[in-house]
Image (cartoon, rainbow, N blue to C red):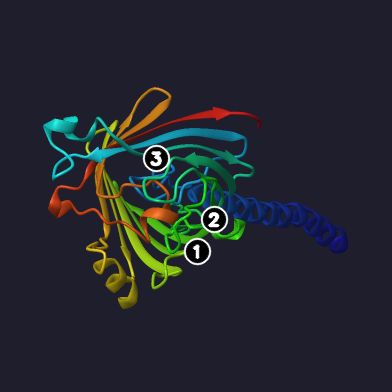
Amino acid sequence: MKKLLLLFGFIATVPAFSQQDTAVIMLETVDDDMIAEEKIPVKVFHSQGLINTKTVEVLSKGVLEFKVSHNFGDLAGSNGGIKRFFGLDNASDIRIGFQLGLTNNLNVIAARAKGAGLVQQLYELGLKYQLMKQEAAPGNPVSITAFMNAVVSSMKANAAPGQENSFEDFSDRISETAQLMIARKIGKISLQASATMVHRNYVMNGDDQTIFAIGGGARLPVSEKFILLADYFHPFHSREARQLYRSMNIELYDVFGVGVEILTQGHVFHLNFTNATETLENRFIPKTITSWGKGQYRWAFTISRNFTLFR
């Protein structure tokens, strides 16, 4: 009889232990799911670019962005003012581009830019890859994105020797940019730092063929649809390059821009002011020769629209 009671007691306790183990497993599973749910991705910036710089954001798979960037002439200074309607009579540079999400992390870029200097009729092919996406705590603290491009000029080569568009062969027409962007959203403020390298296959004798630059950008929402923007680049020109341009009475300047972002139904519109004349990093980072202090800044705008091509 005692053996039967012991056997009955053992059988009765087995479901209890099973229920306890199941409860522990379920609790662990719920905790893992809760932790996964807490890793919510953070949208650091609303668009693919600020004023002159690109942002860490990438498009989702199958999404295509169509973007038009337009830089006008000088707003003030000797080439601006009312006689040229504060720069609106002139177009210094225009870029029409497409960006497509091949995956949720990898985007391909194709664009055509007019060009504002001696090197014009520019075609751009690029890649943008997001290495890390900022997440709500306890996730990733920052977003990290790499960008690289190749730009080629299709213009007729200058017959005069020694100019930056005196191309001798096809490779002379090519320049490349490589950039690593790190950004973080803190409250409502979005901040970004960009380490950049630009290489030009052909330059004037004494100019920098490869140049490094450090950049920064910020986004501050004023309202739900009205946002303040700013970005900046400091190129590290060599002494020889600065002396070369000074011998031609030309100064090299850092690039600075401020503007506003306006979110509309289906479009993102930027109204900017910048001393950069050109729209491509390959051009404005190594050679910006216009200054805010001399009134050589300009109206600029970008407008973009996203389309879903495939899912």
Query: Which is more foreground, mark 1 or mark 3?
Result: 1
Of the residues shown, which amino acid type is indicated by label 1? Tyr
- Asked if residue 221 can be seen in this view, the reply is no
Measuring from the top left, give residue 64's x and y in whole percent: 56, 34
Number of residues whose C-alpha sits closer than 10 Å to that of mark 2, classed few (under 14), some (14–19) or many (20 or more): many
**Label 3 residue SS:** loop
The earlier-in-sequence mark between 2 and 1 is 2
Q: CA distance from mark 3 to mark 2?
A: 34 Å
| CB within 8 Å, label 2 to label 1 | yes
Which amino acid, mark 3?
His
The residue indicated by pointer 1 is 202
**Residue 62 to residue 234: above or below:** above
Q: Is residue 148 above or below residue 240?
A: above
Q: Secondary structure at mark 2?
A: helix
Residue at (22% x, 35% y) in the render: 87
The residue to which callout 2 is attached is 173
- Amino acid at pointer 2: Arg
Which image quadrant: the C terminus? top right
Q: Earlier in the sequence, mark 1 or mark 3?
A: 3
In this view, the residue in front, 253 or 37, is 253
Tell me if 270 is positioned left or right of 305 in this view. Answer: left
Q: What residue does disc 3 label?
A: 46
| Nearer the observer, 185 or 231 | 231
Please say if 212 is above or below 276: below
N-terminal label among 3 and 2 = 3
| Crowding near the residue tagged with mark 1, few <14, some 14–19, many ≥20 C-alpha atoms within 10 Å | many
Q: Residue 10, position in %: x, y? A: 79, 59
